[in-house]
Image: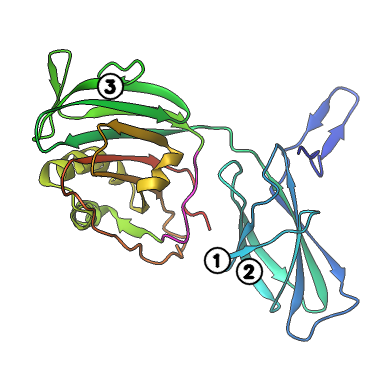
Amino acid sequence: MRFLLFFLLVSFNLSAANFEVIPDYFVRYEKDKYPVKEGSRIKILCEFDSDYDPFRELRFGMNGSNERIKMSDKNEVIVIREAQKAVFQFYYDSNFQEIETDSIEVKPGMITIISLHFKARNEPRPVKKPVIYLYPESDIEISVDLKARGDLTFIYPDYSKDWKGTAHPDGSISINGKNYPYLFWESEQHFNMFDSELGGFLVTKETVVTTLEKHLSDFGFNDREKTDFITFWGPQLQKHESVYIQFITNDACDQFARLNVEPKPRHINRVYMIWSPVDNHRKVFMKPQKIEKMNRDGFDVLEWGGIEVNSELKL
């Protein structure tokens, strides 16, 4: 469904009509006719400037809390909290920008009404260097079918309907008489979120290499794969004083691309790193992520890639 913008500030003079930028949020107060003893009411009103999924929950943070709350069919939520000054964070889904407020005073005896305007996120983000390694137990003819989401921006070696060639136990792949260490692709995708339930890691510039070495070893990457990963991502992460990283694995990676290999491997292991620069003045409230070691017995496929999101934290 499509909703009209809930407010548009317009000023007009004799020479021109000037349209001001629509704020992300607006705050006002009403006297609470039925005040509650345990706190004050906060009423949250949501509007969207493009189509949206009406069944998603609103993710809500207040001074770093992390909650999921159901909206009414009118896109409204009422919560009760202690009177205080607080910074709020609101997140709906990856199609819309996160909203973070300045400090808002929740007043006793008053209803604090926060009207949110969720703006569509139109800028695609590049999913960088997904690479695919194949490790059969002996030389075999293989077919690799990639169904990437978004627009493919680069792929190597050449790809039409699929990659066809011979996979070797050392991980090399022979296609049309040429050998390749892995299969490579990139695409532009609309993705901009962390999964708060997974947790993640706050990494300083000085610890990027040692942190990646540890976590990749925990996953079960071999030395060559760790080297490929770190030499690609390490310089990008070290451009920032600190970054937040999270790993998306296996079936969850279908949101970036579907991958089908024939003959079917015993294991297809997929690891994508989601990361963002972190403002040194902003606290990050996520639990450490649990890393589970991959099973790499028999015919094994490993794919890794990553994407930088343009906001430090999604609740």
Magenta segment range? 191-198
Whole-percent x and y of residue 237? 30, 45
- In the image, which disc is placed on residue 66? 1
Judged from the image, the secondary structure of the residue bearing numbered disc 1 is: loop
Please give the name of the residue rendered at 77% of the width and 58% of the height, measured from the top-left corner.
72
Marks 2 and 1, how far apart at CA: 14 Å
Residue mark closest to the camera, 2 vs 1: 1
Q: In the rendered structure, which disc, 3 or 1, sits on the residue that comes first in sequence?
A: 1
Please give the name of the residue rendered at 22% of the width and 26% of the height, measured from the top-left corner.
142
Q: Is residue 192 magenta?
A: yes
Badge 1 local density, few (<14 within 10 Å), some, or many (20+)? some
Out of 198 and 240, give the one closest to the viewer.
198
**Residue identified by numbered label 3:** 163
Marks 3 and 1, how far apart at CA: 43 Å
Quadrant showing the N terminus: top right
| The quadrant where residue 36 appears | bottom right
**Residue identified by numbered label 2:** 86
Residue kind at label 3, given as amino acid type: Trp
| The quadrant where residue 198 appears | bottom left
- Quick one: which residue is furthest to the front in this view? 263
Badge 3 local density, few (<14 within 10 Å), some, or many (20+)? some
**Type of secondary structure dominating the magenta stretch:** loop
Residue kind at label 2, given as amino acid type: Ala
The answer to whether 161 is drawn above or below residue 230 in the figure is: above
Judged from the image, the secondary structure of the residue bearing numbered disc 2 is: strand
Residue mark closest to the camera, 3 vs 2: 3
Please give the name of the residue rendered at 39% of the width and 43% of the height, measured from the top-left corner.
253
Q: In the rendered structure, which disc, 2 or 1, sits on the residue that comes first in sequence?
A: 1
Residue kind at label 1, given as amino acid type: Asn
Out of 310 and 247, give the one closest to the viewer.
247
